[in-house]
Image (cartoon, rainbow, N blue to C red):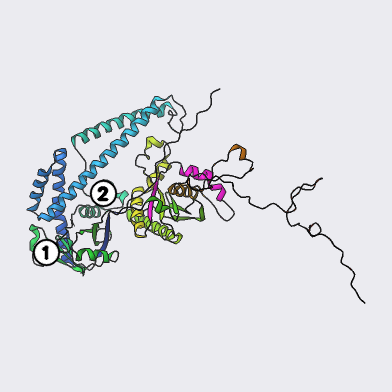
Amino acid sequence: MSEPKKKQLRAIDASFVALGPSGVAIRDRLKNLTEVDDKVLRLVGEHLGRLASLDLKNRCADGLDHDSDTWAARKQGLTADSSSRWAGSVTKATHDQWALSRRCQLAHIQGLEAGVRTLMHRLSQPIGEKGTKRAPGGYRSRGEWFHKSRRLAALEHRLDLARAEREAGVVHVVRGGRRLINNRHNLEAAQLTAEQWRERWEAERWFLAADGESGKRFGNETIRVTPDGEVSIKLPAPLAHLANSKHSRYVLVTRVRFQHRGAEWRDRIEDNRAVAYRIHLDVERGRWYLTASWTRPVVPTIPLPTARSEGVVGVDTNADHFAAYQLDRHGNPVGDPKRFFYDLSGSADHRDAQVRHAISRLLHWADRCGVKAIGLENLDFAAEKTREKHGRRKRFRQLISGIPTGKLKARLVSMASEHGLSIVAVDPAYTSMWGDQHWKMPLTSKKRKMSRHDAAGIAIGRRALGHPIRRRTAPPPQHQSDAAGHRTAQAGPGARGREGTRPPVTERAHDARSRTGTQRTRETSASNTVRDARSSGSWQQMPLLNTV
């Protein structure tokens, strides 16, 4: 009789310290703008937005034949209708948008290839064939097999088109966003009128962004902000007649005051270091905003042993909360689990605010714990949420699609660096399963309720510390009856005495001796009743008192 094959576990990647943020962005509102200020901003944004659309059209037409000469020719053509610096900002934004579209196109092709492979495998299996954890089985009925065969043909056709477009350098880009342009065909579902949609569409296609330039006055010649908050804009050549200051500049009435990182921003512009600015309109609120951004030099991350020196906080990311647990440097859980909830329903601004608020509470708690690092799963659901991958599990697909992995990692790394905390990224393999298996029941008590997510936080923290997720290694066969105590895996591999025995929990009772009859051979040191209490002293008769 053949022995059953053992389950082959996939290789687990090593943990590493995530790189810190490479840039900073701050925002402030442009308050108390006059009607003339609003008109000028709209005219400049509309004019530059039209130039940006034309430049993007020319860049897409060049495709893979683009080189430095075509770039210089496009920039020279835009300079006549704007300025050399405006033309440089427009062409750079165009290149970034085209490159982003190419990356998205490649991800789309990879997703189609994964779907085709899964469908071909399942269609090749007999109908009703059961699947395993490593490979899916066949379809349930002939009808489902027929519909999936038609879907396979559709995916193969899409894949052929996508590959042909990528080889030809063709990308599909929508300035203003594809979601917004699709809302035009279903205004009732988007809860918009035609006028409201038109206003949003035009505002999204405006262009009011200028790259910084080190060595120039206050770090930017196109959109200049002085240390006292005065905002001025270099007007394009066709709109130079609207200037209210010399050198074709228009100075806004408002003053900006960056409350967050204001001192850091002021130091940069006083040293004439590059700062990029972007002006945009929030149509729903009717407010203008100014965003300032700049890059930071790459700071070397701290070594992994240093990040582990004071223990970590293991964090399990879920669709509606963070499940966190503090662990000391030996991998032992400390205290009770913590949960930080957030709501990912509603608008994008609401979701972003919820994530930032939950991360802030998590970081403040980690500061109080005194740790130097946070253990986090290196999640990436880009290729794990397709219909072909999870089949009928629609709720699970919605669950993993709702977790903002990319934005969450970027937010957490950026905000943790301000608190002096490092992010240790770990492999997410088997953390939930092994955490539930080894840590949920031992830590559950009348006063502590442990969930699967809390146990996963412990598993993540132990993996970030370099410890195995299991609580202890199995003792050898000759010691399984506690003949010499259990052997633990809490100490490091180089610690002396790590293979030593565990001391007994309690000392042997002083009266534990072999007795005959039905009396126990081991009793407690103190009896439950006064009559049965034993004494270790001997009885001696005292002499009579001398009363003479």
Residue 432 within the magenta-colored segment of the rendering: yes
User: What residue lies at 34% left-to-right and 29% top-to-bottom?
Assistant: 150
What residue span does the magenta drawing correspond to?
421-449
In which image quadrant can residue 147 be found?
top left
Q: Where is 112 relative to 57, above or below? A: above
User: What residue lies at 59% left-to-right and 54% top-to-bottom?
Assistant: 446
User: What kind of residue is marked 1?
Assistant: Arg
From the image, which quarter does the C terminus lie in?
A: bottom right
Q: Nearer the viewer, residue 313 or 197?
A: 313
Q: Is residue 382 left or right of residue 87?
A: right
The image position of residue 430, as x and y in percent, is: 46, 41
User: What kind of residue is marked 2?
Assistant: Leu
In which image quadrant can residue 212 be found?
bottom left
- Residue at the spot of label 1: 249
The image position of residue 47, as x and y in percent, is: 13, 55
From the image, which quarter does the N terminus lie in?
A: top right
Q: Where is 348 relative to 270, above or below? A: above
